[in-house]
Amino acid sequence: MAIRVIFLSCVFFLVSNVVSMDLYKDPKMDVEVRIVDVLQKMTLAEKVGQMTQIDLTVTDPSVMKDYNIGSVLNGGGTVPEGNTVTAWQNMIDKFQSGALATRLQIPMIYGVDAVHGHNNVHEATIFPHNVGLGCTRDPELLKRIGEATALEVRATGIPYVFAPCIATCRDPRWGRCYESYSESTDLVRNMTDFIFGLQGEPANKTAGVPFVADSSKVAACAKHYVGDGGTMRGIDEANTVIDYESLVKIHMAPYVDSIAKGVSTIMVSYSSWNGVKMHANEYLVTQVLKNELKFQGFLISDWEALDRITTPWGANYTYSVQASINAGIDMVMVPYNYTIFISELTRLVESGYIKMDRINDAVTRILRVKFMMGLFEQPFADKSYSDYLGCQAHRVIAREAARKSLVLLKNGKEAGKPLLPLSKNASRILVAGSHADDIGRQCGGWTISWQGAAGSTTKGTTILEAVKNTVSAESQVIYESDPEAGFAKSQGADYAIVVVGEPPYAEYEGDNLNLTIPAEGVHTIHNVCSEVKCVVILISGRPLVIEPYLPMMDALVAAWLPGSEGAGITDVIFGDEEFVGVLSRNWFKTVDQLPMNVGDKHYDPLFPYGFGLKMGTALGN
Ligand code: GLC
């Protein structure tokens, strides 16, 4: 009997000491052990705090501490004063100090939209948007872009990005179509290698387990689950009406690849599937993603997405919190009214409408990502990465990507008389168009500000600057943004480069039912191409109505949204490099045909999916 008493007292002593020990703080312990250890110590308030993501404009160290906030973000365009690397590092560390002042010292994770480079920060490298990257057909290039992006994001002390967007855009009238790699699911699936660039590639691929190799990498976010690119008439955040088999085949397949590649988080879509809001869809979010596909990372809501579950906006918020958390959302991008979210969620748990098991599942997943990526060990900015922001090596990659994303659609009006490659030794060269000397327009949306903007918004090389840097010293380059009739002829130019296209836009601001080239661009095409030989470089997030103007053009290049390195375009049109890009989406004749994708019975494009000429091709279309 005495031995039994001694034995039991030893066990009690061990357990009580183990429980009081902070096993979760020991990086040598298995991640799952660390999760169990800290989870059992957490109060409901601490758990709910971990599920709360708030915007930088509403937080400070005391808010972080008092509400146990697990995550902070900045919406497109909100940046720390000065928008410099140091300003970002100091801000992240300030918020982190608040998180580490909590009882259990769980670090917060800061997330940012780095969707074509670290597009928030002045002087960061801006890569082509995804519609152009899809035209490269080059997953290895995408991996290098991901690696460069991770380093530039880490330069600012941030460990988490809301990228890649793996939407399969089925209708170019959607304002976010340029964020999609392609209309083809298979091409989007191939492009998910971008995740390896951001996070690193796990040696032993355990599908579904989140993976971030080290502090030079960042946690990724595959978005927006599921069917965001399939809404009716491309209306952003609207309703995707298709059967389950088509939803899986067209829109869900890239998530299978992303989960297999160790993506750490998945963002749920604002849109609905057959009338059911994705943020309230327990079957697709929990049954499919978590139970069938075994996704082990965390699911994050979109910005204020809970408020959009009901109409009018924010009506019956209590229901929205209950429906979304019970559907399987783990972290909520509130991002402003966090006190209301926290009190509603707490009340719903305490009253039994949301089970503690659901909360524990959410917090387990959030902690799994934080432990796995070493955030507990390295919660603060690592200043050794500072010099990567906008570095020359990354600009070289961006220039390569811009070059490889270009698609040559026409080259020459007559057989055997191609216009491209252009002569570098021409005596007089006219450069015209609204987008010829405008870094903001060539980068597009999600650049410095949410919507992007025209003008000298960040560091880079405009197409005009690239032309001047390419041609011989004897050549005279004349620039006129929107020449009147007669001007081009009066200049006696050997040829003209006309750069026109869409203004920058993002999300629903870019929804567009007519997809015409803005009038100024049409005006320039008419006035220049009717008077001198011209190549038109089209800067756009998607195919536009071009057929009526095609006969006027001697050559036409789709440049999409090429980013900060305009030299990628001159590398090709002056013949130093060949065109390699082919269309990532078919080019319609008229918008009446839309939606129109490969395989549709009414498929009758002006330029088909996969089309792309090489220079020297006798006759353009
Ligand atoms: C936006 C977008 C999403 C982005 C998030 C945070 O509304 O839908 O892609 O990551 O909010 O900016």
Image (tube, helix red, strand yellow):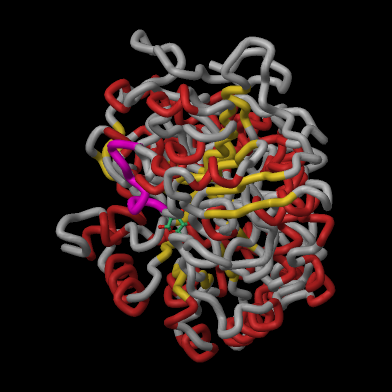
**Is 405 left or right of 485, judged from the image as shown?**
right
- Image point 73% across, 18% down: which residue? 616
Which quarter of the rendered image does ligand 1 occupy?
bottom left
Residue 105 visible, this angle = no
Q: Nearer the viewer, residue 326 or 381?
A: 381
- Image point 52% across, 86% down: which residue? 65
Q: Nearer the viewer, residue 72 or 298?
A: 72
Residue 247: name its quadrant. Answer: top left
Task: Determine whether 53 is above or below 597 in the image.
Answer: below
- Image point 15% across, 59% down: which residue? 312
Point out residue 78 in the picture as x, y percentages from the top left corner: 48, 74
Point out residue 268 in the picture as x, y percentages from the top left corner: 42, 48
Point out residue 230 in the picture as x, y percentages from the top left corner: 36, 33
Task: Determine whether 60 is above or below 116 in the image.
Answer: below
Give, as a single range, the part of the protein colored magenta: 506-515
Task: Determine whether 322 is above or below 560 in the image.
Answer: below
Point out residue 228 in the picture as x, y percentages from the top left corner: 39, 40
Residue 507 is covered by the magenta coloring:
yes
**Is 220 left or right of 280, judged from the image as shown?**
right
Task: Determine whether 497 is above or below 63 in the image.
Answer: above
Dominant SS of magenta comes to loop
- Image point 34% across, 43% down: which residue? 282
Where's the N terminus, which quadrant? Answer: bottom right
**Is 565 left or right of 545, judged from the image as shown?**
right
Outermost residue toward the bottom in this view: 62
Q: Nearer the viewer, residue 601 or 363?
A: 601
Q: What number of labels is visible?
A: 0
Residue 31: name its quadrant. Answer: bottom right
Residue 270 visible, this angle = yes
Residue 132: name its quadrant. Answer: top right
Q: Nearer the viewer, residue 181 or 254?
A: 181
Residue 326 is covered by the magenta coloring:
no
